Image (spheres, grey):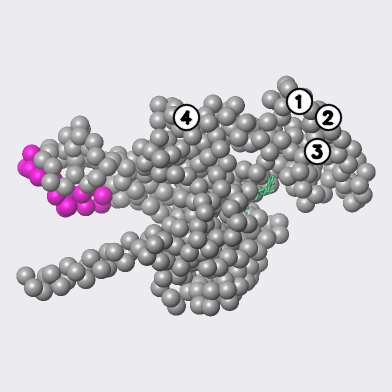
Amino acid sequence: MNENIVTALDIGTSKIFGISALIKNTGIEIIGTDIQNLPEDVIKKGRVVDIEETTNTIFFVLKNLQTKIGENIDWVTIGIGGGHLKGENYTKSISIEPSGREINENDIQTLRREINNTLIAEKGLGKKILYTVSRQYKVDNLNITKKEPIGMHGNALEISVHSITVDTNPLQDIKNCIKNAGAQIESIYPHSWAAAEAVITEEEKKIGCLLLDIGKGTTDICFFTDGIIAATQSIKIGGGLIDSDISRLLHTPLTYAEEIKKTYGYACYPSLLREDKNNILSQQVEILNTSGKLSKNVTVGQISNIVYERLNELFSIYIKPIIMQTGEASIAGANIVITGGSAKIKDITTLSEEIFGLPSRIGAPKNLPGLETTYHQPEFSTGIGLVMLASQQVRKDKKKSSFQKVKKIFEKFF
Ligand SMILES: Nc1ncnc2c1ncn2[C@@H]1O[C@H](COP(=O)(O)OP(=O)(O)OP(=O)(O)O)[C@@H](O)[C@H]1O
Ligand SMILES: [Mg+2]
């Protein structure tokens, strides 16, 4: 196995997307990709419900990737989302004894240990802490720093962290599927962090950016401000609900409903209704009835109204409260970036701007060496972001181990 190759799997409700990258001195190069679409009821709302089918599909994706890259794949990086993950912010402080002395590495370790113990005690059974990211430190309640304040003098030290907790059962199911497919998990990232890595800029993270990854069964959300992660959430609602609404309300088969949504559904129904200069909404569409005959006539307006109702529910009822929780001041100058397959719903950014009152854009993956243009689409953001995060981790680990090597040599001489 080549240690400079990393592989990521985006296990989504509609598809499993595998992607391998070669880590080079200059960056990464994508060297293999594979997508297998999933039928209904294999992954539901981001959770594996058909273990055998999921295992077989992962096996197939890995086998295809191995053929493409000419190497065995033993380790994979995966993502998690879909309501099985929650991000929360915590603060903890300790006093520096004797007061006024220099803060050292031990104080930071004590503080981190204390906050971890609090988190573990609070979470209880069935939950696992996946990440505890330091957001900022405060010395004597005044001096705020993103860096560890080692060397500063103080009486009290406070840390603020963003912690990610996951449900252990869904995670264990995914782990088993991957193990049975012949590989092991190298690392796990929230889906929204991965998507953010692929589509938003460092500048956006600094001024404030809310990322929405709207897939088929889930919506994964994260918010960055001041260049730091401030909120992570996932909701068990995605574009698939629009299909079932269309199917039920217009009496048409589910797979056909999805096609109708893609071709004729506008998210911004009310604003379009107000102007509709080209009479788009009154256009007639012939659709399949439940016995599979093209017979029924509906209008683009009817279809768009269904799309609008669901998205309005998602944005207003589920996402708006999350924005409110993060604090209106921090969100005021922010951008919204929408990604995931459902970002392709026509005029979704118009609706987002209307509901949230913030500039919105579609996020598609950045160009990477070796990445074919067919993957420059929002549904591939998570998979591409996962492989980017995996390669960054390998770089960090390598740096650490070469630093430790240098340290060892240094210790030998002195
Ligand atoms: N052109 C389009 N217009 C509207 N919706 C689209 C379009 N293309 C794809 N979609 C929708 O995107 C969804 C699939 O997106 P994606 O591949 O990001 O989901 P996933 O990662 O498999 O699922 P999840 O992340 O929710 O588990 C489907 O509901 C599909 O109907
Ligand atoms: Mg997804």
Q: Given the image, on which type of amino acid does mark 4 rest?
A: Met
How many angstroms separate mark 4 from mark 1 (CA)? 33 Å
Q: Which comes before the other along the chain, label 3 or label 1?
A: 3
Horizontal relation, residue 154 to residue 4: left or right: left
Q: Which comes before the other along the chain, label 4 or label 1?
A: 1
Q: Where's residue 130, x and y in %?
A: 40, 54
Q: On residue 249, which mark appears?
A: 3
Q: Given the image, on which type of amino acid does mark 3 rest?
A: Leu
Q: Given the image, on which type of amino acid does mark 2 rest?
A: Ser
Q: Which comes before the other along the chain, label 3 or label 2?
A: 3
Q: On residue 324, which mark appears?
A: 4
Q: Where's residue 378, x and y in %?
A: 59, 49
Start and end of the magenta stretch?
96-114
**Disc 1 designates what residue?**
276
**Disc 2 designates what residue?**
282
Q: How many marks?
A: 4
Label 2 with label 1: CB-CB less than 8 Å: yes
